[in-house]
Image: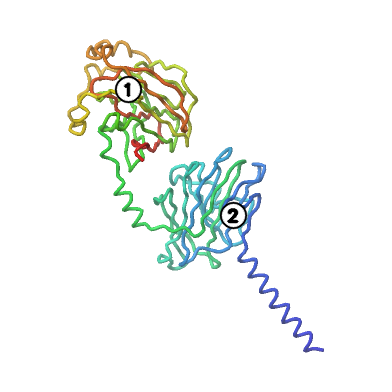
Amino acid sequence: MDDINLHYRFLNWRRRIRDVRAVRFQERYKRMLKNGDTLSYQGNSDEVGCYVAPRPLSKGNCYFEVTIMDTGVRGTIAVGLVPQFYKLDHQPGWLPQSVAYHADDGKLYDGNPVGQQFGPKCNRGDRIGCGIYCDTIEAGLTTVFFTKNGKEVGSLVFPAVAEGLFPAIGMHSLGEEVRLDLQAEWDMEEADSIMMVDSHEDDWGRLYDIRVTGTLLEYVGKGKSILDVGLAQARQPLSTRCHYFEVEIVDAGEKCYIALGLARRDYPKNRHPGWSQGSVAYHADDGKIFHGSGVGEPFGPRCIEGDIMGCGIMFPRDYILDGEDDIDEWDPLEVLPRQGEGRIQNILYLNDEEEEEEGGELDQEHDGRKVMVFFTRNGKLMGRREVVVPPGGFYPTVGMLSSGEKVKVDLHPLSG
C-alpha cells in the first residue's frame, strides 16, 4: 500500500513540475487582444493593458521589435523588458526590475513611474526595438538597448534577473495596436553603414538652425522669437523631372510651427516660407496657406505628428526652367542676403509689405511665368494656388520655429 501511495505522489510531483514549465512558457496578457502577431488594447483607458512574452531574451534570441500600427487616442504604448511574473495592470518600466521606452513621451522608465528623457517620441509606422548585449553580462549586470526604425536610441546597464528578462508591451488608450516580432534581428554595424550610405546632407543647399541626419531635419534654434526661424532649402529647384516632395512630421515639438513650401533661392534665412515674396507655403500649426505675405488664408486642416505634407508644381507640357541644365553648378555660398533682410523686426506678421517694397527686383515677378502649385496631406489633395515662378525657379523649403520639431523629408517620392 505504501508503494502505491509513493507511486501516486511521484506522478503528482511530475505533473506539478510539468504544469510549472507550461506556465513558464505561456504568453501572459491582460486587457489585450492577440490575433497572430498583432496586439490591440481592449480596456476602457482607465486601466493599463500589458503583454509579456512566453520566453526571456537569451544569447540565441537577444532582440525583438514592435511596429506601431495605430496610436489610438493617446499613443501610450510602452516597449521593454520585465521579470517573468510582472503585474499586468502596470506599464513596463513602472515597477522594479523592469525597463521600457515609452512612445508617447520618448522617456525611459527604469523601475519607476517617473520617466527620464531618453529619445524621440514614436508614432504610427515607427518600429521600436529592444535588446540586450549578451557579451556584456558581468557581475549580474547586462546592457539593455532600444532602437527606433533600426537606429539605436540609447542604452543602459541593467541588473540581470535569474529567470531572465521577458519582452513586454504596455498600452493604455483605446485604439492602440502594434505588430510584434519576437524573432527580429538587428545588427549595429549594418545599421551604422546604412546611415552612412543614406546620408542626404548634400541634398540641402542652405541650412539655418536646422540639423540634418539622413532624411531627418531637426530644429536646433532658440525658438524664442520670430527671428529664430530655422530654414532648410533644397540644393535643386523643382523641375519637370522632379516636381513634388513630401515631409512627414516626426515630432511636432512645442508648437508645431512647421511650414512646407517653395521659395526663391535667395529667400531670407529667418523667414518662414510663404511670409515673404517669392514663396508659397502650407503651415502645419494653423492649416493656412501663406503666399508672399505674413497674413495667411484658410486652406486645409492643421497637421500633427504622423501626418505627411506634400508640395508640388503642375508644370505645363512645354515648360522649360531657366538654366535647368545648369542647376547642379550653383554654389550656395554665393547666395547673398537681400537688401533690407537684416532689418526684419521681431513682430510676427507686420512689416512684410514695407520689406518687400525695397526689394525692387521682385516686382519683375509680375511678368514671369505662372504655374499651379498644389499641396497634399496624407496623400489627399488639399488645394491649389496659381503663382509666378521667381527667376531661377522654386526650391523646396521647410521652416521650423519651436523646440523639438523634427520632420522626415523625401525630396523624390515619385522617382520610383
Would you identify the image quadrant in which residue 232 lies?
top left
Tag 2 near tag 1, CB within 8 Å: no
Q: Secondary structure at mark 1?
A: loop
Identify the amino acid type marked 1. Answer: Pro
**Nearer to us in this view, 271 or 330:** 330
Residue 316 image position (x, y, % from top left): 32, 22
Q: Which residue is mark 1?
A: 316
Q: How many marks?
A: 2
- Above or below for 81 versus 251: below
In this rendering, the label closer to the viewer, 2 or 1: 1
Query: Left of 344 or right of it: where is 377?
Result: right
**Nearer to us in this view, 18 or 238:** 238
Identify the amino acid type marked 2. Answer: Gly
Name the outermost residue toward the right: 1
Q: Secondary structure at mark 2?
A: loop
Q: Which residue is mark 2?
A: 36
Q: Could you tell me how far apart the alpha carbons at marks 2 and 1 are, in whole angstroms?
A: 50 Å
Q: How many residues crowd mark 1 within 10 Å: few (<14), some (14–19), many (20+)? A: few
The earlier-in-sequence mark between 2 and 1 is 2
Residue 306 image position (x, y, % from top left): 47, 37
Residue at (29% x, 25% y) in the render: 394
User: Residue 151, labelled with which disc?
Assistant: none
